Amino acid sequence: MPRFIHPERNYYLSTSCKVLYTTLTKQAGLQELSNVQFARALLFDALRGHRREHYMFVRNPYDRVVSCFADKFRRSPPQRTPDTGWQTCQVLAFPFLGLSEQDDFEQIRERLLQTTFIEFVRMLPAIYREEPHFYPQHFMLHPRLKKRIAGPRIRLKKWYRIETELKDAARDLGLDLSIRTQKSDHGHADEYYDSESRAIVNGIYQRDFDFGYPMSTAESTA
């Protein structure tokens, strides 16, 4: 998951994949850190007794899952070529779709585009720990030194819900969050869910609702 440091204002900032990432890379004061660099920086801060505040952007879990589906199974497949290959998050889906990496490229593209939202959600229990685009957002509180090895737990100063608190974040963190290069075009998230898909998402991302989002068991509120 993307991590940043603002050396001048003395804070760390974390976000999940696809949540303001491109906007944050365009901020003059922010420097991106790999997960390993971030975990090491936390350890060095602790050894030196240096205190840096930590902030985080979060997104409604239902909308985040829909956005991931729309990106990886609708927008991305037409743009991929044999030269670019398939993204890891797409390759993880292959066994569930009757595909292998040796299959014809156009056959794979067609099958990805045919994937339904419920098919995607049914895969998540088996693959959500394998790729950062699928990680629960609360994983950001446990930086990874390696895939299965957690670093020190983050002491979070504040989180910002991107739906309602971007102005507060821009003011508090000294960022220009009006630079938005990507906008969701998948419609309202409620249109995608039935009782089964909600139950699966509720189970995997249960702790992400603790960031101030209501959990629903209804099929749709649209």
Image (cartoon, rainbow, N blue to C red):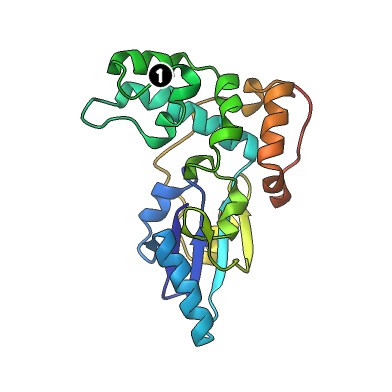
Q: Which residue is mark 1?
A: 99
Most distant residue in the left direction? 83
Horizontally, is 22 left or right of 56 in the view?
left
Q: Nearer the viewer, residue 94 or 3?
A: 94
Q: Residue, x 63% and y 39% (percent of image)?
A: 61
Q: Nearer the viewer, residue 86 or 10?
A: 86
Q: Nearer the viewer, residue 70 or 83?
A: 83
Which percent across, then down, holds residue 103?
Answer: 31, 17
In which quadrant of the rendered view does residue 113 lie? top left
In which quadrant of the rendered view does residue 159 lie? bottom right
Q: Is residue 128 above or below residue 115?
A: below
In which quadrant of the rendered view does residue 7 lie? bottom left
Which percent across, then down, holds residue 178?
Answer: 45, 49
| Residue type, numbered disc 1 | Leu
Instruction: Indicate the quadrant containing the C terminus: top left, top right, bottom left or bottom right.
Output: top right
Q: Residue, x 47% and y 67% (percent of image)?
A: 39
